[in-house]
């Protein structure tokens, strides 16, 4: 029986929602991330109607779990948890960096993709991937670093394409290479990767879902604020 997945992506300035069902993906129009909290549920209902599905037919929620905008990631995590808990279905966390690579590969085909997203504060989120057909293979750990600290070993990274909005913003500091800065993660890629991860058993209970910030100081501050609100 085919899986039905709703996917949410709000980690960058462009947010989106998608539905994956029976090998097909329906993607909402991209909208501003600041509108995500108000629009995601409405967009979800519109896409489900187009797909001829009800919320009760969903098998999982795929969500861009970061890294990315702290506010955007928190919104996506909260919405995914709400849907997962409300529908009693698991959640599949998907890296926003891997989703960016998937978006680029859908346009350019198989190859190596060096993903760099602007993390503000003169830092980037980075990861590299090799894509062959439906298979997306990680070539590095996800990292937070200054753009000038990025070094790509020529023996390993051959004929790679730089993707993500950090490349045009930090051209002088990043290694010289071919790049296209317009690629950002979107929910269509999150849905496809989420389906693959779900099939491999990489889902979690909604209340166990955790964001990935990479910036430890920020994550620690958020945790401390949460404990303070709970009086712990």
Image (cartoon, grey):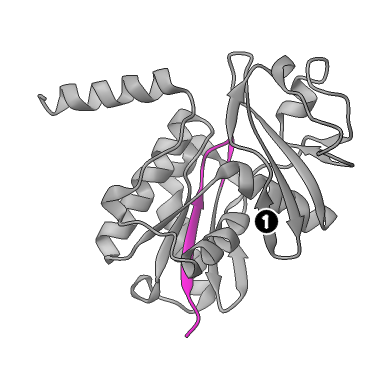
x, y percentage for residue 153? 81, 30
Left or right of 224 in this view: 213? right
Viewer-closest of 179 and 199:
199
Q: Position of residue 72 (x, y in %)?
A: 47, 36
Horizontal side of residue 85 vs 29, given as left or right:
left
**Dot 1 lies on which element?**
strand
Residue 18 in the figure: left or right of residue 227? right
- Above-or-below relation of 131 to 170: below
Q: Is residue 13 found inside the magenta-colored segment of the image?
A: yes
Q: Quadrant of the C terminus?
A: top left
What is the quadrant of residue 83 in the picture?
bottom left
- The residue at the far bottom in this view is 1
What x and y, as percent, mark residue 225? 25, 22
Nearer the observer, 125 or 74? 125
Measured along the vertical axis of the image, is residue 35 above or below residue 40?
A: above
Residue positioned 53% across, 73% down in the render: 50
**Residue reaching furthest front?**
155
Residue located 89% across and 42% down the image: 159
Magenta segment boundaries in residue numbering = 1-15
| Residue at the spot of label 1 | 136
Residue at the (70%, 47%) spot, across then down? 101
Residue 78 % position (x, y):
34, 44
Instruction: Decide whether residue 179 is among the magenta residues.
Output: no
Task: Please give the name of the residue rendered at 59% of the width and 63% of the height, measured from the top-left corner.
Answer: 192
């Amino acid at each position: 029986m085919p899986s039905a997945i709703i996917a949410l992506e709000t980690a960058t300035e462009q947010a989106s929602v998608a539905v994956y069902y029976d090998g097909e993906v329906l993607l909402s129009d991209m909208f501003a991330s600041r509108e995500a909290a108000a629009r995601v549920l409405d967009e979800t209902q519109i896409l489900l109607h187009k797909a001829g599905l009800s919320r009760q037919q969903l098998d999982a929620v795929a969500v861009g779990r970061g890294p990315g905008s702290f506010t955007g990631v928190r919104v996506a995590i909260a919405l995914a948890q709400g849907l997962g808990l409300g529908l009693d279905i698991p959640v599949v966390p998907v890296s926003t960096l891997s989703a960016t690579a998937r978006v680029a590969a859908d346009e350019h085909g198989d190859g190596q993709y060096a993903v760099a997203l602007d993390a503000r504060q003169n830092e980037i989120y980075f990861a590299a991937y090799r894509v062959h057909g439906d298979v997306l293979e990680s070539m590095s750990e996800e990292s937070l670093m200054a753009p000038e600290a990025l070094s790509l070993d020529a023996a390993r990274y051959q004929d790679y394409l730089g993707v993500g909005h950090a490349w045009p913003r930090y051209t002088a500091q990043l290694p010289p290479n071919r790049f296209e800065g317009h690629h950002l993660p979107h929910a269509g890629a999150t849905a496809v990767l989420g389906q693959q991860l779900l099939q491999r058993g990489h889902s979690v209970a909604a209340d166990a879902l955790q964001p990935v910030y990479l910036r430890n100081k920020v994550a620690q501050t958020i945790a401390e604020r949460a404990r303070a609100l709970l009086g712990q």
